[in-house]
Amino acid sequence: MADLKKMIAACKKHKRSAQKQLYDELAEQLYWTCKRYLKHEEEVEEALADSFYTIFTKLDQLKHHEAIYT
């Protein structure tokens, strides 16, 4: 969890490598969550992109780093 806390702190400072690491950490799980609800691959990809946009633009509002997984 210490690594996650450091990764999120680095993402808040707009460090590209940390953002990539967080993306890699969450992408597969988030992809399959989107896939469960959407029929077409294009919709899944759009929802995934929108989700990561929201994650990265609202990261400063995250109070508990563990909540990134919920």
Image: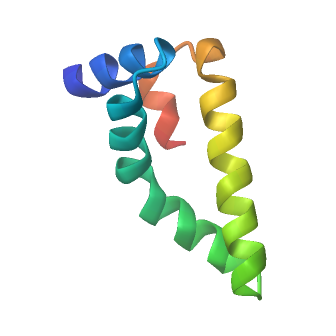
Image-based side of 19 in relation to 48, left or right: left
Total count of labels = 0
Identify the residue shown where x is 43% and y is 65%.
28
Q: Nearer the viewer, residue 36 or 21?
A: 21
Q: Which quadrant of the structure image shows residue 33?
A: bottom right
Q: State the image coordinates of residue 14 (x, y, percent, origin top left).
A: 48, 19
Look at 76% across and 87% down and name the residue there.
Answer: 40
Please give left or right for residue 25 compared with residue 63 in the image: left
Along the line of sight, the residue nearer the viewer: 59 or 37: 59
Q: Is residue 10 above or below residue 20?
A: above
> Which quadrant, please, contains the N terminus?
top left
Q: Position of residue 13 (x, y in %)?
A: 46, 11
Q: Residue at x 68, y 23 (%)?
A: 58
Q: Residue at x 55, y 12 (%)?
A: 63
How is the model colour-coded?
rainbow
Whole-percent x and y of residue 8? Answer: 41, 22
Q: Position of residue 55 (x, y in %)?
A: 62, 35
Which quadrant holds the C terminus?
A: top right
